[in-house]
Image (cartoon, rainbow, N blue to C red):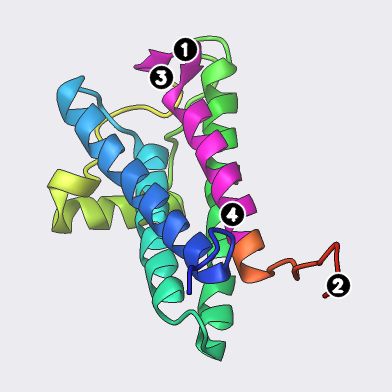
């Protein structure tokens, strides 16, 4: 029996592959282009990694009730990633020197990223500033691309979590 591309299992696995690809792409671009990721960049990287794991597990548990509960967590993660990427995109649109991402007391995101950077610096060390767009691809910063990626992840996760029932045009 051939599985449809739009089954929840397939969609979860596509989400996992896409998010793993975004995670790996961020690592490759950082090394290849000698980029300096900021706290928000690293946090988005972490969210892509978590979404990849959730997508993989939800695809693996495809026909079990646990898939719906586990898959539900992909929705706030993708929405949160979208919000962070949009905020970073907004920061990058501000006049130079007008707004700074890093301030007095570290935020929860900054604290988490600092802790992860101490544990696994190759993956999570923040060395840049959020308001700087170091790389522009086709007129969009990496934060802009990430916002598009998280929007697609949110739509895909919602479609996988709440599948549309098949409608038949012809009855046999």
Single out the mark in the foreground, 2 or 3: 2
| Mark 1 to mark 3 CA distance (whole Å) | 17 Å
In the image, 130 versus 48, the foreground residue is: 48
Q: Is residue 154 magenta?
A: yes
Disc 4 residue crowd, few under 14, some 14–19, many 20+, Cα 10 Å: many
Q: Which residue does the image show at 60% across and 65% down from the upper left?
A: 160
Percent x, y for residue 107?
45, 50
Q: Which residue does the image show at 29% across and 36% down from the upper left?
A: 25
Counting residues from the start of the chain, the first of labels 1 and 2 encountered is 1
Q: Which residue does the image show at 54% across and 50% down from the upper left?
A: 153
| Mark 3 to mark 4 CA distance (whole Å) | 30 Å
- Label tally: 4
Magenta residues, start to end: 132-158
| Mark 1 to mark 2 CA distance (whole Å) | 48 Å
Residue that badge 4 annotates: 156
SS type, badge 2: loop
Horizontally, is 161 left or right of 92 in the view? right
| Mark 2 to mark 3 CA distance (whole Å) | 58 Å
SS type, badge 4: helix
Horizontally, is 17 left or right of 158 in the view? left
Residue that badge 2 annotates: 171
Percent x, y for residue 91?
55, 25
In the image, 30 versus 94, the foreground residue is: 30
Single out the mark in the foreground, 1 or 4: 4
Percent x, y for residue 51?
43, 60
Residue that badge 1 annotates: 138
Residue that badge 3 annotates: 132
């Amino acid at each position: 029996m051939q599985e449809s591309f739009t089954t929840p299992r397939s969609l979860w696995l596509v989400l996992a592959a896409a998010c793993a690809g975004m995670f790996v792409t961020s690592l490759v671009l950082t090394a290849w282009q000698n980029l300096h990721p900021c706290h928000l960049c690293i946090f988005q990287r972490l969210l892509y990694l978590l979404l990849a794991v959730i997508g993989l597990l939800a695809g693996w548990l495809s026909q079990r009730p646990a898939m719906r509960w586990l898959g539900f967590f992909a929705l706030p993660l993708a929405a949160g990633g979208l919000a962070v990427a949009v905020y970073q995109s907004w920061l990058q649109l501000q006049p130079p020197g007008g707004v700074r991402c890093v301030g007095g007391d570290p935020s929860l995101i900054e604290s988490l990223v600092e802790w992860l950077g101490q544990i696994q610096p190759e993956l999570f060390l923040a060395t840049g500033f959020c308001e700087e767009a170091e790389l522009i691809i086709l007129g969009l910063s990496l934060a802009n691309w990430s916002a598009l990626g998280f929007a697609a992840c949110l739509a895909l996760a919602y479609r996988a979590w709440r599948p549309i029932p098949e409608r038949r045009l012809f009855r046999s």
